[in-house]
Amino acid sequence: MSTRIQPGPRERLLTAAQRLSYEQGVNVGVDALLTAANVARRSLYEHFGGKDGLIAEVLRRAAAEDLDAYRSAIAAAGDDPRARLLAVFDMLDQVVSAPDFRGCRYLGADLALADPAHPAHEITREYRQSLHQLLAREVSRLSLPHPARVTDQLMLLIEGTLATGAARPAGHPARDARALAEHLLP
Amino acid sequence: MSTRIQPGPRERLLTAAQRLSYEQGVNVGVDALLTAANVARRSLYEHFGGKDGLIAEVLRRAAAEDLDAYRSAIAAAGDDPRARLLAVFDMLDQVVSAPDFRGCRYLGADLALADPAHPAHEITREYRQSLHQLLAREVSRLSLPHPARVTDQLMLLIEGTLATGAARPAGHPARDARALAEHLLP
DNA sequence: TGCGGAGTAGACCGAACGTTCTATCAGAGA
DNA sequence: TCTCTGATAGAACGTTCGGTCTACTCCGCA
């Protein structure tokens, strides 16, 4: 087997589309994707069936990566569930402070794609559900009276952090959200 | 002076664009706007110079209306600054529970328009600044040690409410956010 | 050596995009 | 009545959109 100098067109297309669909939004043109990936037009339709299929696969891949980032941040914070949950906001502080941060990819996709039948919506829904479960597992260990509600509130703080980070680049929304989470988790 | 059965083309265009650019996103087509407003193509370019000008004017108008809604909710809540601030979330509960709620118009515009030079961005920035001032005025009356930070946190709760409302239509994010605000405001 | 599959390059399609244009019409004012 | 203004209808512009198609090239394998 020969070691590939560069990955195949499917992989290049996914990588380029993951970056471009975030930088420019999911309404980025097919030509821009093909040029950035240096891939023939035909390859897109052979591998993904069309632009929608590519966008869907990009969201699936990004979701897996992002969920891993949450899992890593939680795992690295020790055993105390409270510390593990607060660590999420420390990780988000890094994310929203990055110079190329442009908001939540999944909310952006949901808002940009008006057609409720677009496959992207189901993927974003599953992503949020997975993240919700991730948080719920930690919250449940805290033996709070209303764990479901607290989990929803943590989700709201995360969404608020990402939205505020996109809307008002100055400031540190993740720190503000973390302080609110500290109040929330006794 | 004759009483107009229907408003002029400029007004019709603004009304239709305000609705359509929210329902379908700011990337809605010009043809759809003209058809919905029942207005000649030329009128758009005479009144607004182009689609960007129309979108900008729509955002200006929507911002004025939305700020008025916040002001009204605050004013109707009496004199206690804490009650006035919490009333914002009661108002938001109505907003995000509406069947046609599709998230924050201004965040949607910012995410959809990749070009940072698009006039829409300045308008959304000013809108958030005005809303921030509105909240800051109430927060300042509470004599808290860190009023600026609390104001930022309230903004984050508002953004989080709108984002969560768009992303997870079930549930009552505004109530969750209100509970967090109650912790925040002693 | 020849074959088959995968990838590239690029022309091409119909449709939609934002924009500009001409032509017509209705109403108000001189 | 004549004219000017603002609106209408709609053709047409060039570009870009997503998608299909043909032709050529490359490479592993038999």
Image (tube, coloured by chain):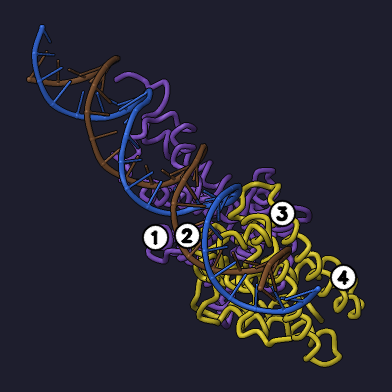
Chain colours: A yellow, B purple, C brown, D blue
Q: Residues within 10 Å of mark 3 (few under 14, many from 20)?
A: some
Q: Amino acid at mark 3?
A: Pro
**Vertical side of C14 occupied by A90: above or below:** below
- Label 3 to label 1: alpha-carbon separation: 29 Å
Q: Amino acid at mark 2?
A: Leu
- For the residue labelled by badge 3, is the local secondary structure a helix, a strand or a loop? helix
Asked whether residue A166 is in view, the answer is: no
Q: Residues within 10 Å of mark 1 (few under 14, many from 20)?
A: some
Q: Do the residues bearing badges 2 and 4 touch, measured as CB atoms within 8 Å?
A: no
Query: Quadrant of residue A61 in the image?
Result: bottom right
Labels 1 and 4 positioned on one and the same chain: no
* Mark 4, residue position: A147
**What percent of the width, then of the height, locates residue A179?**
68, 81
- For the residue labelled by badge 2, is the local secondary structure a helix, a strand or a loop? loop
Report the mark closest to the observer, 1 or 4. Answer: 1
The C terminus of chain B, quarter of image: bottom right
What chain does mark 4 sit on?
A
Q: Amino acid at mark 4?
A: Pro
Labels 1 and 2 positioned on one and the same chain: yes
Question: Horizontally, is C25 left or right of A79 in the view?
Answer: left
* Mark 1, residue position: B118
- The tally of labels here is 4
- For the residue labelled by badge 1, is the local secondary structure a helix, a strand or a loop? loop
**Picture residue at 42% right of the left edge, 64% below the top:** B115
What chain does mark 2 sit on?
B
* Mark 2, residue position: B113
